[in-house]
Amino acid sequence: MKHQLIDREYSLRIQLLRWARHVSLSIYKRFFRVLWSRICPCSCGARYRRLLVEVSEPRAAGILSANLHADINALPGCMHTDASSDEMVSLKVSLLGDCHVGKTSFMIKYVGEEEEKKGMEMSGLNLMDKVLMVRGATIALTIWDVAGDKDCVDHVPLACKDAVAILYMFDLTSRCTLSNVKDWYIRARKWNKTAIPILIGLKFDDFSQLPLDMQWTITTEARTYARAMKAALFFSSATHNINVNKIFKFIMARCFNLPSTIKRNLNVGEPIIDF
């Protein structure tokens, strides 16, 4: 009988210990569940305004691809909108090239003078935004313009990181600026090997006044550089808005694998488009 009482007491103690352990675990689970519910809204449940330098998300890119399939060629006439849309694709584009080739004028021509006033300018770096709305899909472009001074090359890593396209720019009337594109390309490729490369000859309005044989030489040279870089080639003029919008339409089409009506033009004396 004594042994039976001892066994029962021992068994009861074991059950009490198991129950106490279960209660303790339940309390801890409840505590961590409450704690986690407080943390989640701050990290994954909340909806924040997306930064313009954010790399495009696959889900948003799919939505954009569906919405823009029939509208990619209408981009220059898109309606401007506030950057607070739920479905926003943020794209970063970088401009590289020597001083005084026309990079900033090109950027202002595209974003508009009003947006230029809202831009952010730092020493050696100029940032401007343009937001487009196409059938419910919001495209937020951030354009990074790196100054061409040697002292500003330290901005290249920051400007090129996460860029979907890098525009290498030169002055069509200055062959040395075309030669220097090679150095800009090498610097940029160290930090971004996936961006769409585009070689752009600026100041076409001045270039068109040069003798035809000189135009042919520079055009041939530029096409050689573009092939070596595996880049598209555009001749452009910010003053007369030649090919400015087409360049960004080309970027959109390449980013989202969309059809485009942009056609090649290899006629010397005319604004070259080669890809």
Image (tube, rainbow, N blue to C red):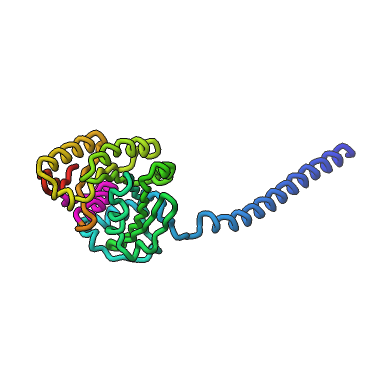
Horizontal side of 34 relative to 164 (left or right) equals right
- Asked if 193 appears above or below 99 in the picture, the reply is above
Q: Nearer the viewer, residue 228 or 184?
A: 184
**In the picture, which quadrant includes the C terminus?**
top left
- Asked if 196 appears above or below 135 in the picture, the reply is above
* Residue lying at 45% horizontally and 60% vertically, measured from the top left: 49
> How many numbered marks appear?
0
Q: Nearer the viewer, residue 119 or 11?
A: 119
Q: Is residue 112 visible to us here?
A: yes
**In the picture, which quadrant includes the N terminus?**
top right
Q: Which residues are magenta?
A: 242-263
- Asked if 206 appears above or below 183 in the picture, the reply is below
* Residue 19, horizontal then vertical, whole percent: 73, 48
Horizontal side of 250 relative to 128 (left or right) equals left
Q: Is residue 157 visible to us here?
A: no
* Residue 169, horizontal then vertical, whole percent: 28, 45
Horizontal side of 268 relative to 122 (left or right) equals left
In the displayed image of the protein, which residue is found farthest to the top? Answer: 228
Q: Nearer the viewer, residue 63 or 98?
A: 98
* Residue 120, horizontal then vertical, whole percent: 42, 58
| Quadrant of the image occupied by residue 35 | bottom right
Horizontal side of 50 relative to 11 (left or right) equals left
Residue 40 falls within the magenta-colored stretch: no
* Residue lying at 54% horizontally and 58% vertically, measured from the top left: 41
In the displayed image of the protein, which residue is found farthest to the right? Answer: 2
* Residue lying at 58% horizontally and 57% vertically, measured from the top left: 37
* Residue 66, horizontal then vertical, whole percent: 27, 55
* Residue lying at 27% horizontally and 59% vertically, measured from the top left: 109
